[in-house]
Image: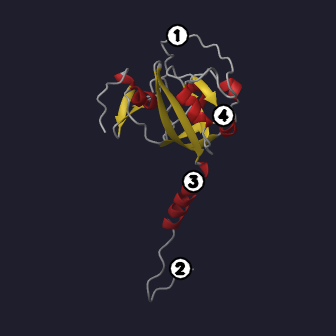
Amino acid sequence: MVLTTPPEHPSRLRVEDGIYLSDGRQEKPTTSRPQEPTLQREGSARELPEAVKNLIEARTGDAVYVVDPDYRIVHWDSRMESLTGVITKEALGQPCYDAVMGEREDGGPFCAYGCSVMHLARAHRPVSSFEMRIKTRSGDRRWVSVSNLTVETEEGPYLVHLFRDTQGTHDALEMAHGLIQLSSKKEPPPREGETSPP
């Protein structure tokens, strides 16, 4: 997939498999909309567009948070609190990249101002699901599967992120990888007619 819309900061993004990825540098947003959260609904910083409200009211077993067009968190549910250890009151109004701190497998930052997810949303392109590691309040790192829904509004795209904890799967894969490495170091069985060394 090739994106026809150039990135806002091309020197800060690279393309992998047709998706723009951030190089990890973070800048503060240039838009200066006043951020005075007033709790309109539990877990939300302000009155949300109707389409966003409908999505977050739908039932899901996943953790959900919503980012406005300025990368500010405007909704953070109780499952996000459980997954990250960050309470709603602390997350609301924060830039998403500061609260979530997502990283790639190599440890480089995935979440940053100008990230590929918002870039694709602004280009009116779908965002495929992906996996990343997040840092929890206790300092642990956990793998999560991320699905995204984009809601177009007059002010720009709102991103509804759904997180599913996949740490158990990654732990099992890591254990299997270790067992394969261990088994490959064993000596081969003796051939017929040979005796094994004492």
Q: Nearer the viewer, residue 85 or 89?
A: 89
**Does label 3 or label 1 sit earlier along the sequence?**
1
**Mark 3 → mark 2, Cα distance in angstroms:** 40 Å
Disc sitting over residue 32 in the figure:
1
Q: Can you give x and y, in whole percent of width and height, for residue 145 in the image?
A: 53, 44
Q: Which residue is mark 4?
A: 77
Amino acid at circle 4: Asp
Mark 1 or 2, which is nearer the eye? 1
Mark 3 or 4, which is nearer the eye? 4
Disc sitting over residue 169 in the figure:
3
**Does label 4 or label 1 sit earlier along the sequence?**
1
Mark 3 or 1, which is nearer the eye? 1
Secondary structure state at the residue bearing disc 2 = loop
Secondary structure state at the residue bearing disc 3 = helix
Q: State the residue lying farthest toward the bottom.
A: 193
Secondary structure state at the residue bearing disc 1 = loop
Amino acid at circle 3: Thr
**Mark 3 → mark 4, Cα distance in angstroms:** 24 Å
**Mark 4 → mark 2, Cα distance in angstroms:** 62 Å
**Relative to 164, residue 15 above or below:** above
Q: Nearer the viewer, residue 62 or 192?
A: 62
Task: Give yes or no for contact between labels 3 and 2 (Cβ–Cβ under 8 Å).
Answer: no
Amino acid at circle 2: Pro
Disc sitting over residue 197 in the figure:
2
Q: Residue at x 48, y 40 (%)?
A: 106
Mark 3 Cα shell of 10 Å, populated few (<14), some (14-19), many (≥20): few
**Does label 4 or label 2 sit earlier along the sequence?**
4
